[in-house]
Image: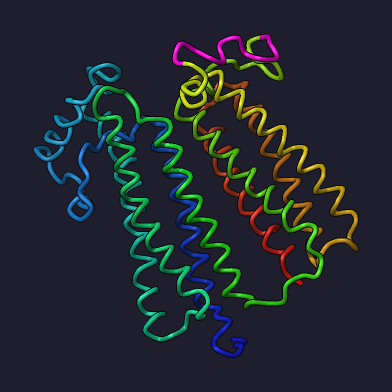
């Protein structure tokens, strides 16, 4: 294993961080499945430790089912649901929470070991502590999100769902970036600085677009205005602003959140085209950057196409999940591009 002075490179640490990032990616996918199957409110209590054990007998299952029957989602949407059907949604949410716990273990145990062995590059130790804090915060935000759907609503609040998704992706990005730093070391800053800000802005745009997608998911906005490129036959939806006003519409209007998500997609397609054009000017980019630019552009175009197909088909579960998975892959590619243009 190549080593630099002061332990500036640590491949085992990088592998650990990349492995945890892969688990977070799986968490995002499983979270999307949980939402799309309507399972997110099936467990009505937050038990960080004892909740790891699922119901083990008929009496325990009936007790969990009775708790679910007291929330609005059951009374207004799933009244008359059988115990077998409840078990189906329960297992989705239980698996989602279990994976969250496993991610915590997969991060904390090696972290303690690497700290004790002094294998984490000194410049990255504080980042690891930040990741640990964000992981704990994510658990709290997850319960805060679930709590919003236990009284007065039949689903979780869209803004809380989006925040929960956004925080997961922040952790995902920090894991990848820190892993790259651990694998390659500090490196030399590229003398070519003009592409740093554009690359960072593109990565930020991808993140913002995913947040807009979270609002679409939280409002079930993929079930309305399923024509394209128009929206219900119009360029601009007439119901963009509802009775709650403009600010309320940005978070809760189905037409508004879908329109905003479409505009974000168009901006990203434009960014992908620019990435291809810039990538062809190889002399103006740090070495190895053009292939990343082409990869990013291809992923964006594939994601945009998949988004249109998903919308027109009224967001069926397989397509919606593929769209969400590919969004995280696009974000990772944008992040890799932003990281690469900063280094010689």
On-image quarter of the C terminus: bottom right
Residue at 64% from the left image edge and 56% from the top image edge: 335
Q: Residue at left 57%, top 15%?
A: 240
Residue 262 x/y as whole percent: 65, 27
Does residue 187 appear to the left or right of 55 in the view shown? right
Q: Nearer the viewer, residue 177 or 62?
A: 177
Identify which residue, 15 or 237, lies in the foreground. 237
Q: Is residue 197 above or below residue 250?
A: below
Q: Quadrant of residue 106?
A: bottom left
**Of all residues shown, which one is farthest toward the left?**
59
**Span highlighted in magenta in the image:** 233-244
Residue situated in front as seen by the camera: 249 or 96? 249
Q: Residue furthest bottom?
A: 5
Tell me residue 292's x, y (percent): 75, 57
Q: Is residue 287 magenta?
A: no
In this rendering, position of residue 223 left or right of residue 115: right
State whether residue 233 is above or below residue 65.
above
Looking at the image, residue 171 sits to the left or right of residue 335; the answer is left
Q: Residue at x 73, y 58 (%)?
A: 196
Placement of the N terminus among the 4 image quadrants = bottom right
Residue drawn where x is 61% and y is 23% of the image: 259
Whole-percent x, y for residue 171 in the image: 47, 56
Residue 157 is situated, as x and y percent measured from the top left of the image, at 37, 30
Is residue 240 shown in magenta?
Answer: yes
């Amino acid at each position: 294993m190549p080593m630099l002075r002061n332990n500036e490179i640590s491949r085992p640490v990088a592998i650990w961080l990349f492995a945890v990032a892969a688990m977070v990616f799986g968490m995002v996918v499983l979270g999307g499945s949980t939402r799309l199957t309507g399972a997110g409110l099936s467990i009505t209590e937050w038990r960080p430790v004892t909740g790891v054990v699922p119901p083990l007998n008929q009496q325990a299952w009936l007790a969990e089912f009775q708790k679910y029957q007291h929330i609005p989602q059951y009374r207004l949407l799933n009244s008359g649901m059988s115990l077998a059907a409840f078990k189906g949604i329960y297992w989705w949410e239980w698996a989602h929470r279990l994976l969250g716990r496993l991610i915590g273990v997969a991060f904390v145990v090696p972290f303690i070991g690497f700290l004790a062995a002094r294998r984490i590059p000194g410049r990255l130790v504080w980042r690891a502590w930040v990741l640990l804090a964000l992981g704990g915060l994510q658990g709290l935000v997850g319960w805060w999100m679930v709590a919003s759907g236990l009284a007065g609503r039949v689903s979780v609040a869209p803004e809380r769902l989006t925040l929960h998704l956004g925080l997961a992706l922040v952790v995902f990005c920090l894991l990848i970036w820190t892993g790259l730093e651990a694998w390659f070391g500090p490196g030399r800053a590229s003398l070519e600085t003009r592409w740093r800000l554009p690359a960072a802005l593109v990565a930020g745009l991808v993140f913002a677009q995913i947040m807009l997608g979270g609002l679409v998911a939280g409002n079930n906005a993929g079930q309305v205005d399923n024509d394209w490129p128009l929206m219900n036959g119009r360029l601009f939806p007439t119901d963009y602003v509802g009775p709650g006003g403009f600010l309320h519409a940005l978070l809760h209007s189905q037409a508004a959140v879908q329109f905003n998500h479409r505009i974000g997609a168009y901006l990203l397609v434009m960014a992908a085209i620019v990435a291809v054009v810039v990538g062809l000017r190889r002399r103006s980019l740090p070495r190895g950057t053009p292939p990343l630019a082409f990869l990013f552009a291809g992923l964006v175009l594939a994601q945009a196409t998949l988004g249109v197909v998903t919308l027109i088909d009224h967001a069926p579960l397989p397509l919606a999940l593929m769209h969400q998975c590919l969004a995280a892959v696009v974000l990772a590619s944008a992040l890799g591009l932003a990281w690469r243009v900063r280094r010689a």
